Amino acid sequence: MSAAMIWVVSPTSEVCNQLGFLETTRGTYSSTFLSQKRLKNVVKKHRCCAVFSEVGLRRQGMVRRVVANPSGNLAVSSEQLVYDVVLKQAALVKEQMRSREEDEDVKPEIVLPGSLGLLNEAYDRCGEVCAEYAKTFYLGTLLMTPERRKAIWAIYVWCRRTDELVDGPNASHITPKALDRWESRLEDLFNGRPFDMLDAALSDTVSKFPVDIQPFKDMIDGMRMDLRKSRYNNFDELYLYCYYVAGTVGLMSVPIMGIAPESTAPTESVYNAALALGIANQLTNILRDVGEDARRGRVYLPQDELAQAGLSDEDIFAMKVTDKWRYFMKKQIKRARTFFDQAEEGVTQLSSASRWPVWASLLLYRQILDEIEANDYNNFTKRAYVSKPKKIVALPVAYAKSLVPASSRKLVLN
């Protein structure tokens, strides 16, 4: 159910029968480039961790919401837990900006002989995957600077591979231990020890941009959740799941796409808007795929809100559109649109060269909600999709919106 796109390369030894490209590159790549990457040991950005303590203490007037957990104790809400990650990522960006201002005479990074060509090959492969599976998004990335473009490709491919673990053809063979190994590989690549060519592209990316490892780990936690959980008692639980599998992508991407120099919005608010876009996209996925998920025995809808509407899982499995279902769906669609509204305010704050693919994604995904309504809320047997003519119309609209300069109005933190 992740909003991250799926790629058919499995990264664990448990499902090695479909390693494909990963296996063909491992032998020729690891013996040369990986040893050099270990020597580089790119961990320079982790000096920013201490900054989080400072930022985490000042929440700009934000109200700290709490909820009761099953043990009866008070716990921080999902929104607050996620916002802590937003603050940490924003702190990394601020620290990098300060470092660049202080270190104007930074020496150029030494590139070891032979490594540059291998890195370019790794990034090219990531670009090929992005072009094959996300044509519209890939087209938008071509407007970015070469360095940002390659970095976004690397993140995109890692997200596809991660999502494939639980949604791909080998998903039935995936265990928690397999996800533990995938997380261990993630930690290695963040420490300059990539396992294969595609890991190497991301390892190089995180050494150049202020990307924190936490959103990546959280996405893996979302995969763990999919292995053990098929019901969500309330929206607080569903929100956390949406963050894990989709909101994380926004937090990963903003450091690459960059914030417009003329933007006066707080860094945290831009990240919060990126998070909102991920949540909106995933909620849209869930509403679009109700019937498909039901056939797998899964219900990604708040159980308490179903009950309030006089509905139950049995009504969903019956796959009949009723007045109760229409009423319920209208409320869910309204919520998703609210998150899209929050996201729109933040897109204008991004670097001008990065806005088009984000606007295109936002507009196209938002139209899926319109299609659900056009189908009379029948998301049981009809799959809502945006037609090719509507996509063609949306692209120039997205491009026009990307030309609007960053707003001078400060965004409000949620």
Image (spheres, rainbow, N blue to C red):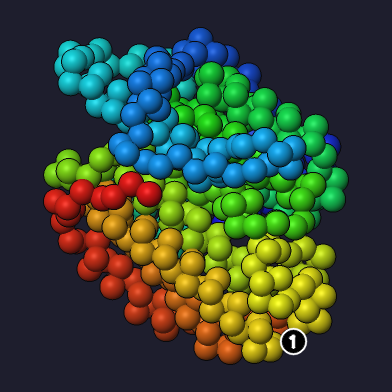
Looking at the image, which is closer to me, 222 or 154?
Answer: 222
Residue 153 image point, x, y percent: 46, 45
Rate crowding at label 1 as few (under 14), some (14 to 19) or many (20 or more) other CA atoms within 10 Å: few
Looking at the image, which is closer to me, 187 or 342?
Answer: 342
Check disc 1 and report the residue beneath it: 320
Looking at the image, which is closer to me, 387 or 333?
Answer: 333
Three-letter code, disc 1? Lys
Residue 409 image point, x, y percent: 17, 52
- Tell me which corner region of the image, top left, top right, bottom left or bottom right, holds residue 159: top right
Residue 232 image point, x, y percent: 70, 56
In the rendered image, the quadrant that contains the N terminus is bottom right
Q: Secondary structure at mark 1?
A: loop
Please tell me which residue is depicted at 34% across the width and 79% down the height of the picture.
393
- Pick out the residue farthest to the front: 72
Drawn side of residue 368 relative to residue 383, left or right: left
Drawn side of residue 277 relative to residue 409, left or right: right
Residue 39 image point, x, y percent: 51, 10
Please tell me which residue is depicted at 54% across the width and 67% down the height of the picture.
284
Drawn side of residue 190 relative to residue 63, left or right: right
Please tell me which residue is depicted at 50% across the width and 61% down the height of the picture.
281
* Residue 261 in view of the camera: yes
State whether residue 125 is above or below residue 139. above
